Image: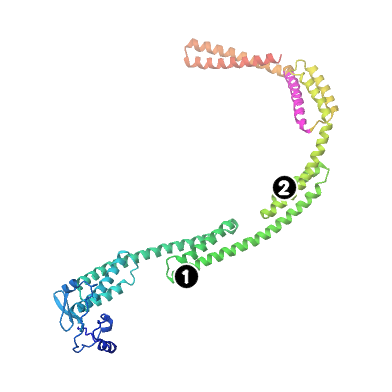
Amino acid sequence: MTESLQPDEASTTEAATETSAAKPAAPSPAAFAARPKAPAAAPAAVHAPDTTVDLTAARAFGRVEGDGHVFVTVDGEEHVAGQYPGVSADEALAYFARKFEDITAQIDLLESRVEAKAAAGELPTSLKHLREQLEARNVLGDIRGALDRVSALDEKVAALIAEQRAHQEAAKAAELSAREAIVAEAEAISAQDPAATQWKTSSTRMNELFDAWKAAQKSGVRLSKSVEEGLWKRFRTARTVFDRHRRAYFSQLDSSNAQAKAVKEQLIAEAEQLQTSTDWGHAAAEYRRLMDQWKAAPRASRKDDDALWARFRAAQDVFFAARQAANDELDASYSANLAVKEQLLLEAQELVPVSDLAAAKKGLQSIRDRWEEAGRVPRADMGRIEAALRRVEDAVREAEEENWRRSDPEAKARSTSMIEQLEATIAGLRDDLSAAEAKGDARAIKSAREALEAREQWLEVVRNSAKDLG
């Protein structure tokens, strides 16, 4: 198709007023597009060629006729690119070459964008527009080479789109997985047993999950509306359930705390009533009872429970401090008694080991009488000194029991009878052994000898016991 370049009315008027002045620069291609063929024009002044265009390359792919028609060669065939009348041949060539360079500049830009892996969404449209411009053959240059570059770009753009789509799908899958992980963890937290939930830790974590969700919505990969709404509904439900459980738990906890405080306030009141008592034994037993009830009572909040315990403990401390002071006073008065009993203990310890049972028993009785008369000793020394005297008493009692065992007539009689029986048995076994030896019966000899040795050992033990019985 021939592109006829017809100047508009203003341009014609302007050209008519010009005389020897230089002709203005060539009009833009858009000003002359789709114009009917212009009538023969008067000779115009010759312009200097556009030195920014490579005319050598332009001449390699086209030519210009005297009437301003420009022809371009594509695949060995010549096509009319358009007409630019009233200018020099170089200007006409430069005009259509510049249009080609504009297209190749766009191809360069697209190649750079593809190489840089820029967003490829709009590239197919740009390539289609470039192909249409080149196939119109209204430019001057290597149109076939440019079309080949566009075709190559088509393949690269298709590959880039596939790559970016795969990357986007992977990013969506990762985003979906991350969102699902947020929802799953929130649901797990909300499903915890309220009685076993660490509320501070769980509340902090639930807030962190909510912040993560908001951050993903703001800067994460966009998910489909249906998927995102479904996940949000689950997440919102989990947070609602968690908040409901938390409110119910702390409401019940407040009620339990109030009950625990009431129980412990009553125990504190009883403890404070007892703190001035001087009935030491009774009051101490009561404090033990109150302590058992305190341990069995439900716990209040940590802050309240610590404060209640401090009051309960303070009442106990008043009582036990008073009791300790009273005991210290008594212990001071018992120090003289301790000195007496220390001396009596030395006297008692001289009775052991027992050599004269009668004298030891008499001496011990005298010591006991004086021990009782001496009175109480300080509590800290009571266990030590009483235990020392018991050891002396035990030694005298053991000596007495040993003496009775030795002098018991029934024991002596039993021992004598046992000796006689064993001696008779041993005599019989010796006869059996002699008879077996006479017969040469090895088995009978062994049996008789073993039985004889056993009875002889037993006899020795019984005789030793009889000696001890005196």
Judged from the image, the secondary structure of the residue bearing numbered disc 2 is helix
Pinpoint residue 124: horizontal percent, then vertical percent.
Answer: 30, 72
Pinpoint residue 225: horizontal percent, then vertical percent.
Answer: 44, 71
Residue 246 in the figure: left or right of residue 282: left
Which residue is more in the foreground, 375 or 76?
76
Q: Is residue 127 magenta?
A: no
CA distance separating discs 2 and 1: 57 Å
Q: Which amino acid type is shown beneath numbered disc 2?
A: Asp
Can you identify the residue that label 2 sits on? 292
Residue 275 showing in the rendered view: yes
Asked if 433 appears above or below 323 in the picture, the reply is: above
Which residue is more in the foreground, 33 or 204?
33
Mark 1 Cα within 10 Å, few/some/many (few <14, many 20+)? Answer: few
Q: Main secondary structure of the magenta part?
A: helix
Q: Which mark is residue 35?
A: none
Q: Which residues are magenta?
A: 379-405
Mark 2 Cα within 10 Å, few/some/many (few <14, many 20+)? Answer: few
Can you identify the residue that label 1 sits on? 229
Q: Which amino acid type is shown beneath numbered disc 1?
A: Glu
User: Is tag 2's residue or tag 1's residue first in the polypeptide sequence?
Assistant: 1
Q: Is residue 392 magenta?
A: yes
Pinpoint residue 291: horizontal percent, then vertical percent.
Answer: 73, 47
- Corner quadrant of residue 355: top right
